[in-house]
Amino acid sequence: MLASETGCAQSETSSGEKLASVYDEPGVPVEAAVKRFTSEHLMFPVRLESESGVIDTGSVWGHSSPCLEDLNSDGLPDLILGDFSGKFQVYQNAGTSEAPKLKAPKVLKAGDVDAEVWIYCCIGSQARFGDLNGDGIRDMISNSYDPGHCYLFMGQGDGKFASREELKDRNGIPIRSKPTQTQNYESFGSFFELVDWESDGDLDLLIGCFDGHLMLRLNEGTTREAVFAADNIRIDCGGAPVKVKAHLCPDVADWDLDGLWDIVAGSDDGSVTWFRNTGTMTQPSFAEGEQLVPPHEGTGYEYLIWHQGEILPGIRSQVEVADWNADGKPDLLVGDFFTSFHIRKDITESDRKVVADLLKIGSPSAKAFGKKMQELRDDFAKRYPGDAIFSEKADKEWSKEYKALRESPEAKAMEGEEKELAQNLKPFLASTRGDGDRLFDLAQSHGHLWLFLRKDTKASPVLPRTRTQ
């Protein structure tokens, strides 16, 4: 219910509430965007490019999701970029360790077909690598939105992978964020990360959950035969569960260079959080999260962008930690998603004012509808606390009440206002995503890949370790 309906419904019903956020001020210099991002650890981000231009997965609804792996064994990490299509684009690194240079992308194959997982809401496919059978060849795993299971692509060497299979536990049950489910969507939108949790030589699994929590699935097997436990263990920090806003996308890396791997997590709101490992190699424990990247300002949808140089990272951050420029310090790669209107280049100053005024007025009824929607979510959270929200009774009631809300006077008024607004705005647009009569159809999607280089750090000079060592 909440995973499959409200996750996407919220994106659409937010239209008109905050249409023009940080990009609606003509003439504002790029420095205005720079002032909006300050970080103790990171420099101001830049969008990565390949020989094809700025990396943008917007043609497949964005949700860029980076991973670095040396697929061709030339000593240079290549970029494997997942996205909303559920496939994986490989950008071969034709540069050097100090100055990577990415070639045009090619689709990653598994068997005789494109490697692919099923995604249709909220996240992008996320590749992670590790040797699960001890043959010296690294294998690839991936998340999925539906059913949220962990998928395995066994490595065959030379950058080749076997056909997709489900990674299962010792009882033959697919590994997921909810081992025992009452509804099939309870594990939707899970992320997976390989890590040697107990430093015993085999690889365990971290599971980032749709609701923003983090779970652990221990490997009870060996380095040559993974046998995963039947249950998850909740990961805590500072005496409470690890938690981000939603859609926790974990990466394991020694962020502070103290010899212990930490957890760096992306989130639905675009933020990135560092959970420092305060334990030991065999008994990890974590401090409360420290924000590395702030949340995105606004909804992530339907922005009016005047200056490309003012674009900031969007929502639904998916992360990768790596030493991008070989200076001994871990840097941060962040994939994102947002939508924006593509304004004609020949627009006049008077037209510019008309567009800005249209979007400032927006759809007044959208605010009323959004309030009703939030009240409904809050009411269900009280009526059905915890896992009760996944019950059959809750599911039936939600479907009934959500349908009634979509047919309410507020919804009808919002639909009429948005149709009129879309028709007024369309003549000023150079291109649109679709040809419908909603703002949602007019705004184009984007999925950029941002590089946050690391500032100088006072951490001890211990060499960074890979996530699976």
Image (spheres, helix red, strand yellow):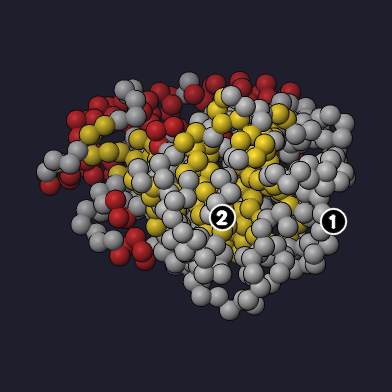
Dividing the picture into quadrants, the one containing residue 14 is top left
Quadrant in the picture for the C terminus:
bottom right
Q: Position of residue 263 (x, y in %)?
A: 66, 58
Task: Judge from the rendering whether residue 456 lies leftward or rightward of residue 148; answer left or right.
Answer: left
Residue 249 higher or lower than 61, as above or below: below
Q: Is residue 316 above or below residue 198?
A: above
Marks 2, 1: nearer the viewer:
2
Instruction: Work out whether mark 2 precedes mark 1 in sequence or the reverse, and give the earlier one.
Output: 2
Q: Please tell me whether mark 1 sits on a helix, a strand or a loop.
A: loop
Residue 163, percent from left and from top: 66, 27
Hey, which quadrant is residue 62 in on the image?
A: top left
Q: Residue at x 55, y 68 (%)?
A: 329
Quarter holding residue 467: bottom right
Tag 2 secondary structure: loop
Q: In the displayed structure, does residue 433 sit left or right of residue 263?
A: left
Residue bearing the label numbered 2: 75
Q: Nearer the viewer, residue 121 or 116?
A: 116
Residue 1 position in % (x across, y down)? 64, 28
Residue 139, numbered label: none
Q: Position of residue 341 (x, y in %)?
A: 30, 38
Front position in the image: 356 or 141? 141
Residue at x 30% of width, y 65% of height:
31
- How crowded pointer 1 is (Cα within 10 Å; few <14, some 14-19, many 20+) is rated as few
At label 2, the amino acid type is: Gly
Residues at marks 2 and 1, CA–CA distance in whole angstroms: 27 Å
Residue highlighted by disc 1? 200
